[in-house]
Amino acid sequence: MNASVSASKGWVAWFTRNPVAANLLMVFILVIGSLTAMNLRVEDFPSLPPNSISVTVSYDSGSALTSEEGVTIKLEEALNGVPGIKQISSTSDGSGSTLTVEQTSGYNLDTLYQDVKNRIDSITTLPDQAETPVVSRQLDIEDALSVHIYGSADQQTLQNTAKRLRDQLLANPFIEEVVTGGRQTPEITIQADEQLLQSMGLSLNDIATRIAAASVTESGGELYSENGTLIVKADQPKYFQREFANILISETRDGQRITLGDVARVSDSYAQSGIIARYNGQPAVELAVQMYGSSDIMQISENVKTEVAAFQSQLPANVHTSVWNDSSVYITERLGLLLNNSLMGIALVMLMLSLLLNVRVAFWVGAGLPVIFAGAMLLLGPNFYNLSLNEITTFGFIIALGIVVDDAVVVGESIYAERERHGASIESTIRGAQRVTVPTVFGVLTTVAAFMALSLVEGRLGKIFAMFAYAAAFCLIFS
């Protein structure tokens, strides 16, 4: 009698006697979880919040030691005692200094940025030739994929093609940043014939003076009056080989004009920067598509491929494009692994339970897994923890898969055994479930506690552990 009374009370008995409520709850979790999963942000590796501030000072000193003594040391001394700084690393070279200020764990980066900026702005002893220090926060940005423009064409054709493709990519609202790599700086090379110059009574200094006077961008100041301001400016820059070749060097008495092209060989070339970019053994220019932490890698990858495919008709002869290092491939493979493991696990469990118990038990054990993952997706969504689907969270799902299957099998087997012993009644079902309710619930809770302990680890590595712990714990909670 006591057993009958206890079996009629509690949430297990209530849901057993009200299957419509249980099924509606299951359907609600499936629908809401599925809708949330379709809108979850997807990324390869989870993006971590910025934790550093950079201070950059351009100073053409020509010596790393001079930059260190004139700029770097003064910047470091100014930042002494600023709260929230974990460490400072610096780099000095002949063109200036760069400091990287890393925040302590848990300290507000905006507060640290303002404190650092105030200290840097108060420095008055930097060299006169040094430019104003630039203080900036680290950007939450990472590489998404690369597009290579390559072929047997000349460097100018490759770079012009890359520029047009970059403009087209940036016109897409889903593509936020594109960085050009392997690009060489164009320059004009002028090779003068010294003997020819001497025969004309000219020198290299004469040539240099004429070139400097013909290609100039100078501001002469401003003239103020009651009617407004007049800006005085001499602006006549030259960029191409033909423009330099037509520069007037001298004029003979009979009116013959001598241009730079008459006394020197003028050619378009590229600065010797040490950059040699190759793709499949051919000259190439890279367009690195980058994404911010709030972006969706799948959406960016799809839009880039669409834009690149539409650009094919605009490619010059002997120029090709190739999408490479696509980060969306890795998360797609991980999601595929999760799906395959889930389907395989459900199939094997249902097969074994069908052979050893019965098909009905096997079906409900298998049906519980989609509900569990849908519930976990719901908690991952923007309305709760606002996490993304990435390699870490999907790994948590895979780990939790085996645990939740074991729990479902234990509950199903207990109900089946009780119904076999006392008959196929609602009371037998309730007693079978209640028999394992306490050990199952507490077993799940202790496992959840073990996973959630990982979320207490501090630092950037702790944030990675937390994502794994949350994903696994959410699955266990809904199990």
Image (spheres, helix red, strand yellow):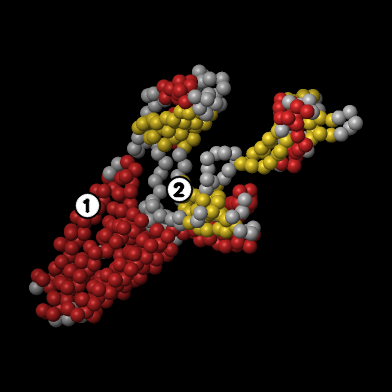
Which residue sits at x=57%, y=56%? 151
Vertical comparison of 214 with 360: above or below? above
What crowding class fits label 2: few (fewer than 14 Cα within 10 Å), some (14-19), or many (20 or more)?
A: some
Residue 224 place in picture, x, y as percent:
77, 24
Q: Quadrant of the N terminus?
A: bottom left
Element carrying mark 1:
helix
Residue 233 place in picture, x, y as percent:
75, 30
Which residue sits at x=45%, y=39%? 138
What crowding class fits label 1: few (fewer than 14 Cα within 10 Å), some (14-19), or many (20 or more)?
A: few
Residue occupied by mark 1? 450
Residue occupied by mark 2? 142
Residue 219 place in picture, x, y as percent:
72, 28
Element carrying mark 2:
strand
**Quarter residue 346 falls in:** bottom left
* Label drawn at residue 36: none
**Quarter residue 212 falls in:** top right
Q: Do residues under tags 2 and 1 come within 8 Å of each other at their CB atoms?
A: no
